[in-house]
Amino acid sequence: MTDSKQLYQEVILDHNRKPRNWGLPPDATHKSEGVNPLCGDHIHLALRLADDTVEAIGFEGDSCAICKASASMMTAAVKGRARADAEQLVQEFRDMAIGTLDPGEPHHLGRLTVFAGVRDLPTRVKCAILPWHTLHAALNAIASTSTESEADPMHAPMGNA
């Protein structure tokens, strides 16, 4: 097994077993619910914005290991960041997951590039990007989102995925 695949598996397993920022902050200013109807992932995300900075963020729900790990790493990555920086990460992560961002080129993803290989697993791409869809929705006062919604500005058709 290649080192990148082994690291990917280790990160997924670690964040699935011990998700960071599990649970919703009680004083959230922004919330959204995300659903991936293809595999059944269903998460709730809540955050508190203060002075346009993500002061607190958390999630909960029922999802596969890839979705939970992505949400865990996403919440850790955006906590303490400006809203615009969080939105930039949303776009870069989505682009990386669908294969339009080369992780070798300049970006702001840092450790999130461990998910770069998901682009080679079309049926798992939407599992990885659901938390990011949901963060985008929450930041834009959209109560719910789906990886299959045509109205969702983050909608990324992936063939049969």
Image (cartoon, rainbow, N blue to C red):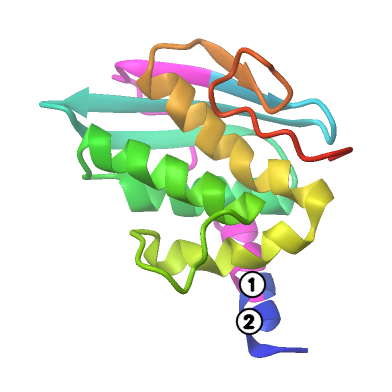
Local packing at callout 1 (Cα closer than 10 Å; few below 14, some 14-19, many 20+) is some
Direction from residue 3 to residue 50 in the image, left or right? left
Q: Residue type at mark 1?
A: Tyr
Q: Is residue 130 magenta?
A: no
Location of residue 64 in the rendering, given as x and y in whole percent from the top left corner: 75, 46
Asked whether, in this view, residue 137 is left or right of residue 65, the answer is left
Q: Is residue 148 visible?
A: yes
Q: How many marks?
A: 2
Reading the image, the residue beneath label 2 is 4
Residue displayed at 72% across by 39% down: 63
For the N terminus, the image quarter is: bottom right
Q: Badges 2 and 1: C-beta atoms under 8 Å apart?
A: yes
Q: Where on the picture, by quarter, is residue 106?
A: bottom left
Residue drawn at x 74%, y 23% is 148
Name which residue type carries label 2: Ser
Of the pair 106 and 53, the residue shown nearer to us: 106
Residue ID at (28%, 35%): 56
Q: Residue furthest right?
A: 160
Residue depicted at x 42% and y 25%: 46
Residue 20 shows in this picture: no
Quarter holding the C terminus? top right
On the picture, is 49 further left or further right than 9? left
Q: Is residue 94 above or below residue 14?
A: above
Q: CA distance from mark 2 to mark 1?
A: 6 Å
- What residue is disc 1 on? 8
- Image x and y of residue 143, in percent: 51, 10
Extent of the magenta region: 10-32
Q: Nearer the viewer, residue 101 or 1?
A: 101
* Residue 22 percent location from the top left of the image: 49, 41
Label for residue 145?
none
Q: In the rendered view, would you say 127 is above or below 96?
A: above
